[in-house]
Amino acid sequence: KVPHKKEKIAALLHLIGCVHLMNGEHKKAMKLFEESLQARRKVLGFVHLDVASTLFNMAFLHQSRNRLDKALKCLEEALKIRQLRLPDSEKVALTHEKIGTLAKAIGKSKKAEISFEEALRIRRLIHGDDHEAVATVLHEMGDLMDDLGEYDEAMNNYIDALNIRRKRLGRHEDVAATLYSMGFTLHNQDTTERAVQCFEEALSIRQERLGEDAKEVGDTLNMMGFLQAKRGELDSALSLLWDALRIRKAHKDDVKVSETLKNIGNVHREKQEHILAVECYEECLRIRRNELGDDHEKVADALIAIGNVKSDMEDIDDAMRAYKEAHKIRRLVHGESDERVAAVLQYMGTLEFRSGDLDNARSYLQDFVNIRQENEADYDGDYVNVLFMIGNIYKIQGDDLRAKRCWSEAYQVFQELGLAEENPQIARVMDSLLQGEKARPKTRPQSTSHPYPKKAQKKPGLFGSITSRFKDALREEKMPRYGSSGKPPAR
């Protein structure tokens, strides 16, 4: 009778913990779960299903308190018990799904992939191929593949999930959720038109099912506004983004409000409405400092936006001040050799070049090159730009040998990237420059970005005319891959 009584006490502790959990009293709930776990292990043994249930609830609590490693450990222990006692069961599938979600959140992509695949196998075994539980796992696998940059595989998973959900649910929020995620992946594949179609259908369903002012509607409007801006439909973008901002403010989701403000600022900057852009970016920065603290990546992101628009306005001091603070934050958050640190160094070096401080410019730009080389990063237009600018600085300072070395490497990368075929006029200029001829294009190529400032145009060399064709070094960063998924805001 004594063990039976102790078992009942352990069960009672677990139930009271569940009540505290439902009431949001997480500290009390955790204390009771820990006592229940200890009692259950003592009375029932370490591999009893009731022990697994307590571990599963403890994992939820750890996750809600952002203790993701502890949560994952609890789930893995619960899974071992459930696999032993209930192989290929609903509870085993659910535990695999939770492990997959947590592993994805903390960057353990391979573990997440294995867990989702096992969950999918069991779900299909239990429910068949066309069940909503199967669609849920397929959707999660799509999100994971998108995070890993495996966009074709992500789309395959989303399409399978969407087909099941359309068939079983009709115009349902889960259908809208899959369309929304598909829109992100299509955006990442640069298939903007199809992405817009997905977001438009998601918006229609969400407005119908959830109401015009639902937070999910605000998220969708925000992404649609972002994509319209990308297509150059700036007035349409502003209309959508202002609607998104109104909804997000109503839901008091300040971080998402800051994201929409930044998007609105980007549109104003594109329209060369610099004062309005500054107002949006500064409000975005204020919110992010307040919500996230001073040393956060999103604070650095807002500071870079301010630096970019201040540079457009030729307010060099304010621009450099913003860049330097962003640089400090990124070094603190990501480390000295992170690619995001290199990106700020490029902005700082370009700004110093424009202001005429060539020594500082070369120092910042060389640090950019060193980080990229240390990380063995893939070559891109930024790398070519920076190398060419360093060469230009050496040329101005009279060091022709080093200038030619930089230009030679820049030209080699330029060709390896296939840019020579796409930009034959620039290729001819670079080749002529390396041959020592004073060749220039007959006309200055038109930049797709802000024109290179007059102050820099007066300096000798061909940097301004060449780089404007393939990438303006002070162009606004691409929308960052927010969160671990690396996507635009409000996934």
Image (spheres, grey):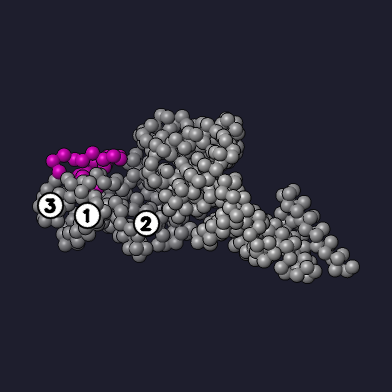
Residue at 72%, 59% in the rendered image: 53
> Label 1 crowding class (10 Å Cα cut-off): few <14, some 14-19, many 20+?
some
Q: Which residue is mark 3?
A: 432
Question: If you read the primary sequence from the N terminus, does the residue marked by circle 2 or circle 3 appear first?
Answer: 2
Question: If you read the primary sequence from the N terminus, does the residue marked by circle 2 or circle 1 appear first?
Answer: 2
**Residue range (magenta):** 441-467
| Mark 2 vs mark 3: in front | 3
Any mark on residue 415, and which? 1
Q: Secondary structure at mark 3?
A: helix
Residue 454 place in picture, x, y as percent: 24, 41
| Relative side of 434 to 386, left or right | left
Query: In the current view of this chain or complex, which residue is farthest to the right?
Result: 1
Question: If you read the primary sequence from the N terminus, does the residue marked by circle 1 or circle 3 appear first?
Answer: 1
Front residue of 233/182: it is 182
Image position of 185 with respect to 74: above or below:
above
| Mark 1 vs mark 3: in front | 1
Q: Which residue is mark 2?
A: 342
Q: CA distance from mark 2 to mark 3?
A: 30 Å
Q: CA distance from mark 1 to mark 3?
A: 15 Å
